[in-house]
Amino acid sequence: MNHRPILLGIVGDSGAGKTTLTSGIAQILGQENITVIGTDDYHRYDRLQRTEIGITALHPDCNYLDIMQQHLTLLRSGQPILKPIYNHNTGTFDPPQYIKPNKFIIVEGLLGYSTPALRECYDVKVYLAPQESIRYGWKIKRDILNRGYTEAQVLTELEKREADSAQFIQPQRQWADLAIVFYPPSHEAEVSSGHLNVKLILRPTISHPDLSKIVASQSSDEPPTIRLTLDRDMGKPVDVLEVDAQANRDAVKVLGRMICNDLPELHSFCDREIDPNLGKITDTTGAILQSYPLALTQLLITYHMLKATQNYH
């Protein structure tokens, strides 16, 4: 590698959409250039032990945060690690895996920003905060289809985790460079995974591209589907980019061109049409849809990852 690995953190509560966000970023950058680290692998206890002790996976005491920090520091310096493996299907641990760092490392999980030492490991920090009703629906669907739970079991687990989520997960939002809030187009609208608005909360902790160009590119004959405003989040001033569910492919192309102009490293992406997997979502009926608000979000995060590489050539 001609620069040290670039680390992206994606933190959010269980079922917040971390893996979906990661998959689109990997599509842009190339799977061969990405190492993904799931911090659930650093659980201290298996599922049965957690039940016996009466602790949730969201509690810091249920995780080896010191080992996680040590491993991220090693990966950031280009060194391999022997990573533990937590098996979500069985609720137990599999043999550890030898992991080599790649050009880009995406670290997704629950407690990635919970200590100052962990926060120092990342080049870009993202926090996912979908509306709670949406997150609940996503978690229920995932845990039933992929992890063998019943709906009643998922709802019971969500209730158990509420206090720890409020105390340990949600406060990490303050450390993010970019907070992402998916929400339905209206309070009356039926929640559908593929048709959601997104609010991108941009903190001045990193340098964001001139997103006013995307707003200005919209037709003046129709109500704007993308808006850029000033606001406050967790008591601090922020820029906010709101993208409605009705945003179309043209907006994605505009952001794509901006990235290409700023970052020639992305030439392979610039030379082709928008990847059909970008913004891909499976809705509540199982249909595959393309969400342009999600695609824009994935592009913006990719921009920051590539921008970070320029500092280390």
Image (tube, rainbow, N blue to C red):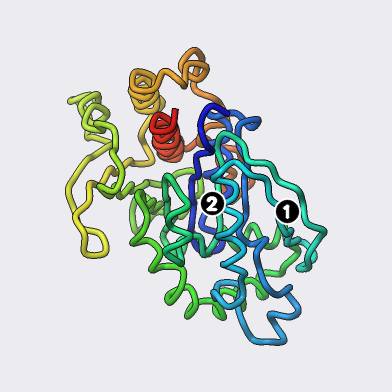
The residue wearing badge 2 is 18
Residue 108 visible from this viewpoint: yes
Kind of residue indicated by mark 2 = Lys
The quadrant of the image that shows the C terminus is top left
**Closer to the camera, 45 or 219?**
45
**Residue 1 - label:** none
The quadrant of the image that shows the N terminus is top right
Q: What element carries label 2?
A: helix
Residue 95, quarter of the rendered image = bottom right
Q: How many marks?
A: 2
Kind of residue indicated by mark 1 = Leu
**Closer to the camera, 67 or 94?**
67
Q: Residue 66: image x %, image y %? A: 57, 67
Alpha carbon separation for disc pair 1 and 2: 23 Å
Q: Residue 127: image x %, image y %? A: 42, 55
Q: Earlier in the sequence, mark 1 or mark 2?
A: 2
Q: Residue 203: image x %, image y %? A: 28, 50
How crowded is the residue under tag 1: few (<14 C-alpha within 10 Å), some, or many (20+)? few
Q: Is residue 279 left or right of residue 84?
A: left
Q: Is residue 217 above or below residue 18?
A: above
Which residue is outermost to the bottom?
Answer: 53
Which residue occupies 64% across, 86% down?
54
Q: In this view, does 193 lie above or below 87?
A: above
How crowded is the residue under tag 2: few (<14 C-alpha within 10 Å), some, or many (20+)? many
Depth check, mark 1 against mark 2: the one in front is 1
